[in-house]
Image (spheres, grey):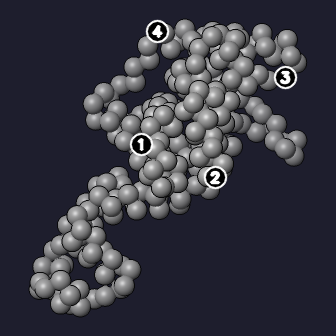
Amino acid sequence: MDRIHNLIKEAQNGNKEAFECIVNENTGLIWSVVKKFSARNMEIEDLFQIGSMGLVKAVKNFNFNYDVKFSTYAVPMIMGEIKRFLRDDGIIKVSRGLKETAFKAARAKEVLRAQNNKEPSVDEIAQYINVDIETLVTALNASRDVDSIDRKIESDKGKEMNVIDTITAVEDKSGEIVDNILLKAAIKSLDPREQKIVNMRYIEELTQSDTALKIGVSQVQVSRLEKKILKKLREYMS
């Protein structure tokens, strides 16, 4: 079992440090999915909050019998959470409890920093204010004031930069991976006949006429089916 599967197993068994590690390592994955919805009339940070909830669900619900990479399982979960929100709600709703948790976390961060002379981890903050790490992560993402994306940080080379600069770099690196995952998931959503046509046309690179002969229909029918399939794939990935 690889490292991420070990971390997921530990997180599902209540290991908060493992859960924190998974969240931190998959922040770029969330941003890559969120980027696909950037044209919508929504705050990008709000969509990241919703996507984070999808990642939390992916960790909790991941089944090792699926025999797939965690990212392959998590991307549709993250995207589904965002789509569900855009379809059903339209407005980000942040509960009073989450706002209070975020406020407590901000105060705890200052106290722990002063006590230990270093930046506290998410796990340390969660223990200090006595909440589980899933609730804390959701609260932090729900409150943009907790940690601004415009906050100045120092890079490894000593150069000053904003937090958003590091996020953008991760998005550009993982976007292609997310597209591949979504395309595979979209193809799996097709019925067997449609999958067969996709395979013959785009994997075996057969012509529409050769494809028609193999499945016993006319070339015109293959053309119509292909247009229908491509429309389904675009809708799934949009």
Disc 4 is placed on an element classified as: helix
Sooner in the amino-acid sequence: mark 2 or mark 1:
2
Q: CA distance from mark 2 to mark 4?
A: 39 Å
Q: Residues within 10 Å of mark 2 (few under 14, many from 20)?
A: few
Mark number displayed over residue 96: 4
Asked if residue 33 shows in the view, the reply is no
Tell us which disc is closer to us: 3 or 2: 2
Sooner in the amino-acid sequence: mark 3 or mark 1:
1
Mark number displayed over residue 77: 1
- The image quadrant that residue 233 belongs to is bottom left
Q: Is residue 113 left or right of residue 208?
A: right
Q: Residue at 85% x, 11% y: name it.
A: 115
Q: Which residue is mark 3?
A: 118
Sooner in the amino-acid sequence: mark 2 or mark 4:
2
- The image quadrant that residue 38 belongs to is top left
Tell us which disc is closer to us: 2 or 4: 2
Tell us which disc is closer to us: 3 or 1: 1
Q: Report the amino acid beneath label 2.
A: Asp
Q: Which residue is mark 2?
A: 2
Q: Is residue 132 left or right of residue 21?
A: left
Q: Nearer the viewer, residue 220 or 55?
A: 55
Identify whether 84 is placed above or below 119: below
Q: Residue at 12% x, 79% y: name it.
A: 221
Position in image of residue 176 (x %, y %):
53, 60
Identify whether 3 is placed above or below 221: above
Q: CA distance from mark 3 to mark 4?
A: 29 Å
Position in image of residue 165 (x %, y %):
68, 43
